[in-house]
């Protein structure tokens, strides 16, 4: 090789970005989010408009309210009730044609208290709606 010969480096060729791997990643993300999401149906309380006929209709449909405060304390329709007397009070409600009981948990209520209240409601044959709590 001569001292005058110059060796030129070839310019680096850019490789084009392949879209096949990008499409695979997007498909996998789509599949993940479809499988990870849940489609739940939430229960709804029936609502009606105003008027005297509506008040009579909603009075028959209106659920009883059972508040679970925790530490064994409960209220059924704003009346204190013990866990032992709960079954008898719920049977009276069923005789008065109440079909639903809305269960609300207080700040100190634990899961065991709420589940035992739900079990008592189901044992009588009423349907329960878990309203939630603090």
Image (cartoon, rainbow, N blue to C red):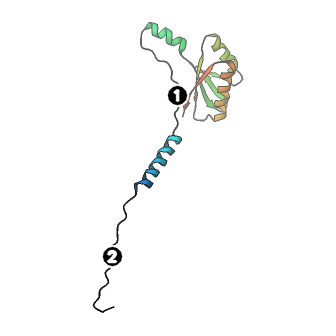
| Quadrant of res 82 | top right
Residue bearing the label numbered 2? 10
User: Measured along the vertical axis of the image, is residue 118 above or below residue 110?
Assistant: above
Label 2 crowd bin: few (<14), some (14–19), many (20+), radius 10 Å: few
State which quarter of the image contains the C terminus. top right
Q: Position of residue 98 (x, y in %)?
A: 60, 14
Q: Secondary structure at mark 1?
A: loop
Q: CA distance from mark 2 to mark 1?
A: 67 Å
Residue positioned 54% across, 14% down in the render: 61
Q: How many marks?
A: 2
Residue 54 to residue 75: above or below: above
Secondary structure type for disc 2:
loop
Contact (Cβ within 8 Å) of mark 2 with mark 1? no
Nearer-the-camera pick, 30 or 41: 30
Check the image and report above or below for 12 versus 44.
below
Viewed as shown, does residue 9 lie left or right of 115?
left
Q: Residue at x 50, y 41 (%)?
A: 34
Foreground label between 2 and 1: 2
Residue 39 position, x and y percent, is 51, 33
Q: Horizontally, is 50 left or right of 122 in the view?
A: left
Q: Is residue 128 above or below residue 36?
A: above
| Residue 58 position in % (x across, y down) | 50, 13
Expressed as whole percent of the image width and height from the top left, the position of residue 85 reads: 70, 20
- Residue pushed farthest right? 84
Q: Earlier in the sequence, mark 2 or mark 1?
A: 2
* Tag of residue 42: 1
97 and 29: which is toward the camera? 29
Q: Residue 7's quadrant in the figure?
A: bottom left
User: Split into 4 quadrants, where in the image is the N terminus?
Assistant: bottom left
**Residue at x 69%, y 25% (from the top left corner):** 83
């Amino acid at each position: 090789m001569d001292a005058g010969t110059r060796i030129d480096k070839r310019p680096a060729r850019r490789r084009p970005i392949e879209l096949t791997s990008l499409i695979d990643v997007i498909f996998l993300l789509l599949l993940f989010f479809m499988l990870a999401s849940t489609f739940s149906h939430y229960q709804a309380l029936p609502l009606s408009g105003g008027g005297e006929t509506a008040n009579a209709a909603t009075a028959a449909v209106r659920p009883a309210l059972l508040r679970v405060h925790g530490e064994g304390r409960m209220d059924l329709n704003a009346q204190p009730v013990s866990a032992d007397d709960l079954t008898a009070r719920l049977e009276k409600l069923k005789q008065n044609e109440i079909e639903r009981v809305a269960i609300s948990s207080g700040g100190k209520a634990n899961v065991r208290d709420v589940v035992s209240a739900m079990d008592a409601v189901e044992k009588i044959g009423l349907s329960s709606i878990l309203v939630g709590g603090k």
